[in-house]
Every structure is written in structure tokens, then in C-alpha cells.
Amino acid sequence: MPKYPFSCPGQTSVPVTIIPENYTLLWDGSCLNETSLYIYKKSVYEPKTLLTFPGDLCNLAPGSMLPVLLVLLCFVRLGSSGVPSFNPQTLYQYEYTLDMQIANVARSSIPQTRLEVHANMETYILWRNQTQPDEQLVYLQFNNVTYLNMKKEIPNRKEDTNAQHPNEAVKTKGMMLPFLFHWHAGKVIGLYSTGEDNNYVLDLKRGLVSLFQFQPIPGTHSEEDALGKCQVTYNVSEDFIYKTKDLSSCIRSPFGYDADHKVFGVSWNSSSNGYLLLNGTTFQKAVSQESYNLSANLGSLFGTHITSRQQLELMSSKPGPLEIVGESIEVVLGKLPEKYHKVPFQSHPPIHPGPTDESSLLKKYLAIAKRKKLTVPKISTVKHFHALVKTFKHAKKRDIQQIFQAASPNLLPFFIDAAVAAQSHASIFALSDFLDFTKKKQAKIHEQFLYSAAFAPYPSIELLKLVLEKLRAKVPNPEIMETGIIIAGTIIGKICRMDLCEEEDVELAKATILEGLNNAEDEDEMKIYLLSLKNAQLPETIPTLLQYAEEHTGVVCSTALSALQAFPPYFLSDQDVKDTMKSILHQTHQLHDKNSRLMAAETLLLADCTLEDLTNISTGLQLMDIEPSKLLISKLHNRLNLQHPLKNTSNNYSKNIFHHNYWYLSQAGRSVVFSRLLTATDDLASTYGIDLLVAESGLLKRSIFHITLFDLNHHFKTMQLTVEAQGLEFLLGNEEREEEGDDASVGLSTVLFDVQLRPVKYFQGYMDLISKVLSGSGEPLSEVKGNVLLVDYLQWLPMQSGLQAMVQYQGGLGFDISSNVAVSIWDQQTKTNLNVKAGLVFELKTEVDTSFFHVDMSAKFEAEGTIDQDTTTKVSNSPVSMCIELRHDDIPYRETYITTKTYPEAHTTHTVRKGRKSTLRGRDFPFHCANSEMCGLLKAEEDVITKLTA
């Protein structure tokens, strides 16, 4: 074994005879109180081991160096392996196996799909660097590539399945063409192809070359392969190199789009690991395995499990071709008969094609466009909507315009919804040319377009620019202008949540909204801009909202507080927010109306409320009337019942609040907060609830009905309906009003899918009420209807094996929300009905594609139903009687699971279909006990009257 000199200044070199041939021992040259020794492996330019010894190594006698060097040798033997490389003039023959499995997580009865690829492979060195022999240009070529055609899969019997069906040869052109890769000390530097490979074949070759990338460098490093640029961690032993890849760290070509609402998003976890077995420096066996689990956050109905395993094992070696002499890779490539060129090591997303029968689909929708009617909340309509969105994503501008022009007035909103949801450049330009906001007759279509833009799951900057461009025109309808301003805030907020807030067009849009608020002259105009900021939910606007809440009163203050309440609790826990709420509650700087003070206290409860905040609320109760105080106490108890952090510390404190405010809280009050579970699964919960604020007269002052979805980490406000009434005491013959200036009015404010819509007034003033009662047809008034994509998710999932998966998740909803208010002056009774009809379709599709195999696994859920919420108020009774009812009709639903496998070279297709259908029976949902008792009394009274008049 060669000897490497080791010496101290002024001393004779120490012969080191136990360092292995491929290692070098270096010393930092210091002769201080401690000495550092480094072990370098030849051709690896960073230290493998660093040992620090106390004392002066230079004063050690040569014989005493032996223990030190023995320690070094131990580290070398136990913590290192050889540099992977091939010997010159040797032809290696390997067996390559690729095993991919894909299974539906939700339905175990559907057999998993499995693809096995087997191949023989030959490799040898074309060239190596004479000064650094482990830098090599390696030749690779597939031979006898076959795949396992699994025509009849048997669940849980994988071994039997493999044995039953013979392998079929892959006939894809280019699969057998040779390819090259540049290799240096276990790291792949470049990949070279003849240019005749199609993308699928090239990806499989990338996957094979990725198996050769094992670097004998312990620790975490950045590394590029077919997956992208990822963080990998190596552990090295004498004969093995172990690699673990962090798939979440991978940087690759951007592709697809994600869900805006996390409740409707897709969660996935993944793992990737492998090992290399070396025989000296020879590549003996390499194994790599990766696993992906994808599931929809909405529930366990949708999920896909994908595993991919590669194995490369040396079968034999024999004398091979001579090396090509050359100074560089470029020189060697020029000497080869084939024309090789460098190709990217990373896989790239495929071009996602549109429907193969796009022209026939466009003709189909042209025919549908001429229909007179299409029922929006039907499952069949939602399916048409899904298909139309996919078609519009790839359609040309003139085709979309042709459909717009041919559509009947009743069906035009349906096509507007689909064009906005598609958000292709063609669809945006088609909408821009078709919509003319200066035409008052098109107001319905303009409103439909704006709401469609608000509900878009991932609005583009082009869509925001289109909305702002249309609002800059002379809009003759003020309601459309107001709607557009509110919706612009929604789009800005969604774009900012996609980390595009710093874009110039978005900054301009934000400045436009804030400038409009600053220039607003009356309360109604300020309210519209504040609602726009509510939809945007930009943290940077919180100081502005606090300013308008504190410096104004009435509708401006309450709207600013409503906008603040839309923020997550951690924003409301900021001390500036809490101080402003306390100022409004205690009227520190100016007088505020009762409603504003109540909302300030509610905002404190929504924050991460502390005992100090509870103290402020309790002292504020004395400044309020009985009903608001009752409502706040009910909200406090409701939060404590929901496992709020204050629960363990404030139960006794809430009792103290009651004792200290006994005079106010012991009096009878009817305001209450109520919430209950609507439905629940292992992954998702849905709740319904109502907040009732009753006036001192017993009349309803404010009612908030809401349905909210929760997953483990997020929530989504599906629907919130706020009915506010004031000045209705004249119905009781009472001319006194709770607030000065209150005019008789009833209004509705709607939040749908986390989007605040433009508030509407049922009537404003006594004469307006009488006019609408006399002229009313009794027919429900449609508040908002349309088709929206709740989620539109498309992601590309490249695997190290070279296989690629495409995951598409789409959820569409067709809905029609209508309301009806019936006022009987004769019976002194009001009845309010809110009707929600909806059709829902969710579909998760996972595709894996190669030139010789294609699998398409889809899961679909469909449901259709109706929900009614009724409120009956009898003002002739004393006190006023009120009954609130919530019910849903029968809800039929269907689950469908389909797996389709196609073998293009064999011209065969196999499909497995499973599913079930059932009906969720209709039922009533209870509210608090007092409400149930009142409903029973009013029903009995109504039955008596019916019998007497029969």
C-alpha cells in the first residue's frame, strides 16, 4: 500500500502506511493547543471526516501517531463507500424492473391497477477523464422491453395475478435507441439523446438514469433528476449508499392551478427513498421507491394511492468496446456516428390536450344554447357545466362568441358562467367583446358576469383587469356599479392569496378601491367600498377599517366592523384592534349607536379573548339594553361550549359577570345564539346556526342564519343570510322608535361561498311597504342563481421512475336562492321563506400515461336537494310570537368509481365500474327549546283558525 507523507514543521515526515489507497490524509498545519485532521477521498472535493485532537500533535513522537491513525481508519471503513463508476473496456448487462401501482383509496372493492415493465440493459464507458477517472460518459441501451398486461386483476392476490399473464413486448419507436449520460463521482451531470425519442420514452429513460445518481457524500444536498431539483439526504456505509428525498422541496416547472379554499383542496403526502449496493466501485444493485397519497379535503370519498418502484441489478459483465479518446465530452460526441444532443434531466409537464371531439362538443352546445330553459340546480345541468368549462378552456375566441350570440336570453347566463370559470385567454377576450356595461338592458347579464367572477376559484389578473375596465365605462345602472366594486375586492383578495399581490395591476386595483373610499361623500357610497375591503381581507387595510369604525357611526361604523369580523381571529387579537373596539364599546371618543357598540363587543369575542377583554365586555353590558346583553352572554356561553381556550379559566368568571350584572341579565330576554351539527364525517363537519337579536318590543331586529363547513384546519362559510329590520314598531301601533331617525325597513345581506354580495332592501319606508304588499304577486324573488366551480384543481405529478400522473379535481355547483316575504296587515303576521335549491357534482380523476399504457381512475359524487328556512312572526300576540324552522327535502345522491386501462399497442381497453346510490331522507332541524315550543303554539293556533274558516 502506498505511503503518504505526514509531517510537522521542523520534523521528519511521518510514514503513514495504514491509509487506504483511495484516501488522502491532510492536516490543517496548526501546532496550537488542538490539531485537526481531515480525511479526503480522492476525486471528492469536500472532507469526509473531521477529527479534532486536544494537545499539540507536533510534539507527539512518531510512534504515538498509531492510535490516531487507527481511529481515522475506523471512520473510513465504517462511514464511507467507494465512488460509483464503471471499469473501462467492460460491457455490463443489467436487468431493469419498473413496478407501478395505483389504487382507489375510498373503494377497496375496486381492484388496484398494476403495471410492470421488464427490460434488459447494456452499458459501458464511451469516455472517461484521464485526470479524474470517475468522470465518465456512459452508453445505455434497452433490450427486450416488455410489460405485464394485467387483463383480469384479482384484489389482494398480486402474486397470482403476476403469474397468470404473459409479458408483451413494447413496440414503441425509440425505446430501443441508445442514450448517454455524463457521470461524475455518482452525480449525473448531463443526459444525451439522438432526438428520435418521444416524450414518454424520454421520461422513462430519465427515470432509468436517475437510478445511477447516488453520491457517496453523507448529509443533505440539492440534487437534480427526473423529478426536479430536490433536497436529498445520504447515509453511507461500507458497501451501501442510502438516499432519502424530500419530495415537498422539489422545484420543477410550474403547471396547473390549486384550490383557493383549502376546505375544497387536495392534500397529499409522499415519500421517496432508495439504496445502492456497491461491489468495490461497481454498480451492483440499485433500488428506488416512491409513494404518493392524494386525498380531497372535502371527505374520504376521494383518494388515490400511487407507488412506483425501480430496480436495477447487475446480471453479468464481459469485455466491451474500447474507450474513445478525447479531451472533452463535445469532442467525443463529434466522433460518434449518431448525432446526440443534450436534453434536460428534468421531466416537463405534458401539453394537456382539450377534448378530442371539441368540434362536435361545440356543435352540441350551440344546439343547447337555443333552448328556452335550463334548470340551473339540476345534476344534469352541472355535468353540462363541467364539460363546457373544459371545452371553453381550449376553444377559440370566435367559437365562444358564436355560442354567446346564439344563446337564448334564459341560457346566456349559463354560458357566461362557463366562460368565466374557464378563464382562458380566448374566453376572457370573448367576454370583453361581448359585454357592454353601457347598455342598461344587459344589467342581468352584467350582474351574472360579476358574480361568476367573484366565485371563480383562482381568478386571473386578466379577469381583474376586465372587471375594472368595464367599471370605468359609463355604467348607467348604479346597482351594477356597486356590485362591481364589491366583487373587485373579492378578486383582489383571491389573487393576493395566490402570492400575486405585488403585481402592478393588483397594486393599481387596490389603490383604486382605497381612493374610491377616501373620495366617497355619503354613507351609502362608503358602505360599498368598505364591503369591497371586507371581501378582499387584506391585512394592510385593517388600520383603514379601524379608522372608519372609530370616526363614524351608524351604517359606516357597523359596515367597517363587519369587515373586520371577516378576518381570522389572530388579526383581531392585535392590540390596536382591541383598543378600538373598547373605545367604541365604551364610547370613549364619541357617541356610537347601539348596533355599533354591540358589534364592537362581538368583535372582541371573535378575537382570542382574554379575561381582560371579558372585563371590558362585562362593564359594557351596563351601557346596553337587555336584549343585546342577553345576546352577548349567549355568544360567550356558545364559545365556551366549543372548547374555546378560555373554557378552563372563565367559567367562574362568567358567573361573576352574571352576579355583577344581575339587574340587567335577570330580566326576560329573547335574543339568543344557537348552533348545531348539520352533518359530519371523519374528515369534515358542517354546522348550522342562527343569531337572533330581538328589539325591546319583541319584534325581530336582526337575524343571522349561517351554514359553515369545517375540516381539520380550515372553515368555509357556505352561506350566511343576515336580515335586518328597523322601525317596525308601527305594526304594533307604537310610534316610538329604538333609534332616532330609524325609518321602517327590512334588508337582506348575503354571504355566499365566503363572498359578500350586494345587500338588498325588501322595502324602505312605510309607503314602500304598503305599495309592495298591494302589488306583490306572492311569487318568490330570485336573489342569486348560477353555476360555479367550487374547486378547479389540476396538478402534474412527475415521478423519479419517469412515469407521470395528472390529478384533476373539479367541483361544480348549480344553485338557485330565492326568498319570499309575505306581510298580512289584516292578520298582523309576517312570513319569510328562504329557499335554496342546489345540484352538486364533485369529480377526482387521476391519470398515468405512457406510450404503451394508460390508466384513468375517477371518483364522482353527485347530489341534489332543497333547503327551506321559514320565519313566522305574529305581531298580534303579546309578546310578539316568532317561529323559525329549517328543513331539507329528500336528497338523492350517487357515488361512481371507474377505472379504465388502455393498451394502445395491443388495441385493448378494460373498464371496471363500481358505484352506489341512495337517498338522504328529508328532516327538520331543531333550534333552541323556546323556539320549538313557540312553533308548536303557532301551529296549533293556525290549525284552529283553519278549522273555523273551513
Image (cartoon, rainbow, N blue to C red):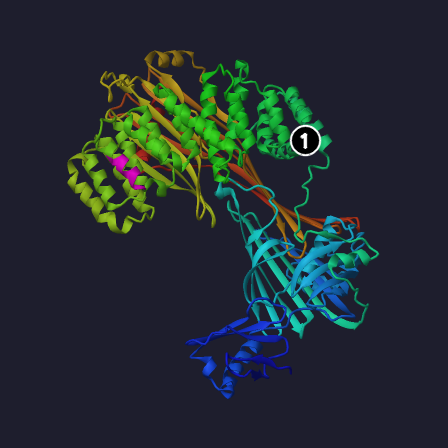
834 magenta-colored: no
Residue 773, placed above or below residue 297: above
Q: Residues within 10 Å of mark 1 (few under 14, many from 20)?
A: many
Secondary structure at badge 1 equals loop
- The part of the chain drawn in magenta is 574-582
Residue found 69% across the figure and 39% down from its top: 353
Image location (x, y in percent) of residue 635: 29, 39
The residue tagged 1 is 395
The amino acid beneath tag 1 is Ala
578 magenta-colored: yes
Residue extending farthest bottom? 63
Left or right placement of residue 735 versus residue 202 in this view:
left
Q: Quadrant of the C terminus?
A: top left
Residue found 59% across the figure and 19% down from its top: 409
Residue 132, placed above or below residue 687: below
Q: Quadrant of the N terminus?
A: bottom right
